[in-house]
Image (tube, rainbow, N blue to C red):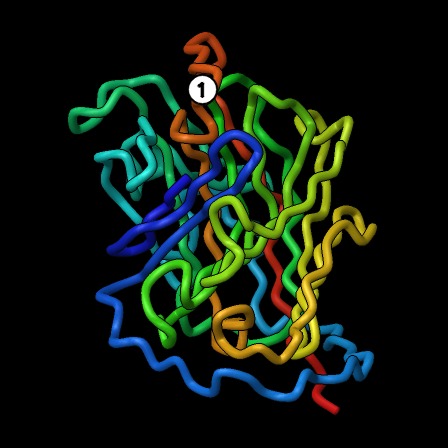
Amino acid sequence: MIKINTSILLCAFTGLVLIACGSKKSDPAPNIGPVKTEPPTDKGWEFETTASFADEFNTDGKPSDANWMYDTGGSGWGNNELQYYTNTENNAAIKDGILTITAKKEAMQGMNYSSSRMVSKFEHSIKYGRVEVRAKLPAGRGTWPAIWMLPDDYKYGSWPASGEIDIMEHVGYDPNNVHFSIHNSVNNGGNSKTSGRMIETALTAYHKYRVDWTPYALRGYYDDTLVFTFVNEGKGSSTWPFDQKFHLLLNVAVGGNWGGVQGVDDTVFPASMQVDYVRFYKMIDK
């Protein structure tokens, strides 16, 4: 897929291969930095128990402007997606302690579907830490929800050079098979790093999707079970661009190069991803 961020390109998955997502603003000139460094050792870092940023979605209505902004627009997002992203309660709203991001079958600015792509405000971004999101995923062929992270500043160049962390991706034609992935200059396209897990109630119950991010590794957990590990081998930014601040994105795409592989079933709409909470915990340095 290619999920473009606030103003550029991004995410892809074709066949069995994730290709993924993008960019926030005009990409600066690449600053590649050292080609190779000594691999870090695993110091067994722990994380603070009080969240540095959290949204429990306890106030009904539109999500807090202090916490969230939006990527808006259509034209496929570089990935042949079919939705137009809005910034209204029509597609993202809170009720009874739950954020609901809804994709709808409706004409919108020349597109045939509407949805929302929420982006956490950059003042809440983190470099190293734990991110947890408790969510229930939409059902139906053609849906493509994601919980993912992009860098605030594209220090090493445009996607995929500055990295992407996919905490959760799911496509509706493959029910309950949930994917954790990372992308960098080396690991993208046919060489992506990804791992999936079958969660039999992913579409009917809430589950915790989590990343523990340290200088040594990115580790993905579903319901606190380890499902993915990517270790920093000290080869520089080509494989480890994950030494800068990242922010969170929540979205439900429709169709696209991965989500639309088996077409779109219009009878499933409206289709929603529901989010109980989002929490960021800082790493305790040693």
Q: Does 106 sit above or below residue 96?
A: above
How far across and how far down the image is residue 4, in percent?
32, 49
Classed neighbour count for the residue bearing mark 1: other residues with Cα under 10 Å, few (<14), some (14–19), many (≥20): some
Q: Residue at x 56, y 51 (%)?
A: 166
**Is 266 on the left or on the right of 192, as rendered?**
left
Q: Which of these two is toward me, 195 or 139? A: 195
Q: Quadrant of the C terminus?
A: bottom right
Q: Residue at x 82, y 79 (%)?
A: 44
Specify the farthest residue to the left. 110
How far across and how far down the image is residue 42, in percent?
78, 80
**Is 130 on the left or on the right of 118, as rendered?**
right
Q: Quadrant of the N terminus?
A: top left
How far across and how far down the image is residue 197, in percent?
74, 38
Amino acid at dot 1 = Pro
Secondary structure type for disc 1: loop
How far across and how far down the image is residue 264, in percent?
43, 15
Q: Does 37 sit above or below residue 186?
A: below
Residue at label 1?
270
Q: Residue at x 41, y 45 (%)?
A: 11
